[in-house]
Image: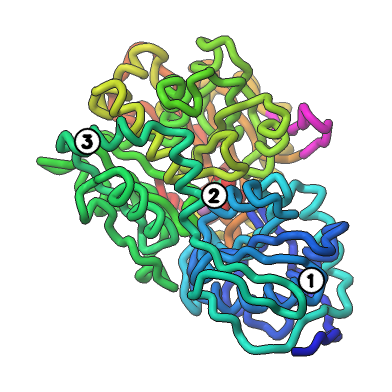
Amino acid sequence: MALKTVPTQPFPDQKPGTSGLRKKVPVFRQTHYVENFVQAIFDTIADKGGQTLVIGGDGRFLNRTVVQTAIRIAAANGFGRVLVGQGGLLSTPAASCVIRKHGAIGGLVLSASHNPGGPEGDFGIKFNTRNGGPAPESVTAAIFERAKNITAYRIIDGPDLDLDRLGDVTVEGMTVTVIDPVADYAALMRELVDFEAIRALFAGGFRMRFDAMSAVTGPYAKAILEGALGAAPGTVVNAVPQEDFGGHHPDPNPVHAKDLFDLMHGADSPDFGAASDGDGDRNMIVAPGLFVTPSDSLAILAAHAHRAPGYAGGLAGIARSMPTSRAADRVAASLGIRAYETPTGWKFFGNLLDAGLITLCGEESAGTGSNHVREKDGLWAVLLWLNILAVTGERADAIVRAHWADFGRDYYTRHDYEEIESEAAERLMQGLRDALASLPGRSVAGLTVASADDFRYVDPVDGSVTERQGIRIGFAEDARVVYRLSGTGTAGATLRVYIERYDRDRLDADPAAVLAPVVEAARAIARIAEITGRSEPSVVT
Ligand code: VG1
Ligand code: CO
């Protein structure tokens, strides 16, 4: 084996987005593309000599290849040890757990999350820091700067390692330990939720369907739900990770997890349905006959978290991303605890969690998490739900309806306009920005605009400021519309329009009917059809 310094040219497009660098697989397959980016990451880590680095990914196409490359570059850059999940696998929350538990200086998580996989699909590289969380903006900006100026990378020449055999091997003085990807994570879950109570629930005949969507959560859900908790064999479906996720979008929502959605809405549905995404950080919860919006799920978990051992002492505070509905704020107010509103993306929760200001946090995009790691955690959310069901003895749909009766209901939907022209998307957003001052007072679709701004976040811990995080329009009728452009797409631009309306009394209406005027107002105010040429969104969740 030999250490080489390889001259290279920078790629101008290695700018991390909402969650790491995400591109089409052919982009990542360009010569030196992966090497440049990994070297740029390592160049921003001070004092890495002798330190531990965690590497793993969601098993998609290129995962194994990039794991091998990253190990070779790590060995050439002086790391002391690499912990890598067996088969190159680690879910995003498990990677966060392993970084924290083993005192690693950081980790590489190879994933494009819910984006499709395969040779023509997407790939991604995320860097997580010492606290186990996604690199904050200051770090991702430094990585991008470095990538734009890189002239060489260091790498060890040598054969591929056997990633399937547990244990240690040495690469040029660096130890590579292949670990069981599930063990540390499962041990952490035992500390947080009442496994005995959930075991008793399943033993009593409780039926569940968990759809792992042929992605990384399969082995975790099998081991924990069917193994440790005694759920019936076959509870976990699509449990084997596939490089192309079986050709599907591993995105747990009513559109892409339609089989589960339909099953839960059919006669004789199981008692509980859940799904997770490509890298295991998202979750979808479906009660019998009732889809639970992620915003509601966050609020319900917050209201009941004290029933689980890990949260018996209560919550310090709750944070939600700005486009997430205000349901969680209502719970925080009733508990007399702090509520925070952050920009989209998990990296903004890290400081709040590290400072002990919050215990739970979540996003409308099906991400929920707590201070147990520094990522959102799909399976954890499912286990916390199961803990609540086990302790209360209530049906999941009854818990949701009781929550609405207590707090009122935040009707919610998100409209995505995917792969629109970038220029049109920018023009639409600029048009909204230009109109902000003139919007208040305007009547549209029977609603009156009460407020309009472009969300700006001041981090309460370090004072850093993040601007232009989405246009918020508030209506006098207790409705709200948010517009922002996706930072995870890989083709054109994706416009996300978040639509919500609060009702204290009408709890069982059809969400589409309640939200129809708000949808109409959202389209009119932004002139969506006129500017994008699309009269309907591509995905409604
Ligand atoms: C989307 C979601 C955001 C989430 C991000 C990463 O970002 O909206 O809430 O944090 O994906 O999640 P964007 O910029 O496309 O709206 V994951 O599970 O893709 O790592
Ligand atoms: Co994800």
Along the viewing direction, whichever of 540 and 109 lies nearer the viewer: 109
Q: Position of residue 324 (x, y in %)?
A: 53, 33
| Labelled pair 1, 3 in contact (Cβ < 8 Å) | no
Q: Distance between the Cα atoms at labels 1 and 3?
A: 49 Å
**441 horizontally vs 174: left or right:** left
Q: Position of residue 499 (x, y in %)?
A: 48, 34
Q: Please rate how many residues cluster around mark 2, counting C-alpha atoms within 10 Å: few if below 14, some from 14 to 19, many from 20.
A: many
Determine whether the beta carbon of the residue marked 1 sits less than 8 angstroms from the nearest atom of ligand 1.
no
Up the image or down, 516 lies above or below 79; here it is above
Circle 2 residue:
93
Q: Dot 3 lies on which element?
A: loop
Kindly tell me whether mark 3's CB lies below 8 Å from ligand 1.
no
**Side of 468 relative to 83 (left or right):** right
Residue that carries the numbered disc 1 in the rendered image: 39
Placement of 272 over or under 307, stated as above or below: below
Please indicate whether residue 179 sits to the left or right of residue 388 in the image. Answer: right
Asked whether 166 or 457 is in front, the reply is 166
Give amino acid for label 1: Gln
Q: Is residue 291 visible?
A: yes
The residue to which callout 3 is attached is: 288
Is residue 108 magenta-colored?
Answer: no
Which of the two labelled residues, at mark 3 and mark 2, occupies the earlier sequence position? Answer: 2
Magenta stretch in the rendered image: 453-466
Is residue 462 one of those drawn in magenta? yes
Mark 3 or mark 2: which is in front? 2
What's the residue type where badge 2 is placed?
Answer: Pro
Disc 2 element: helix
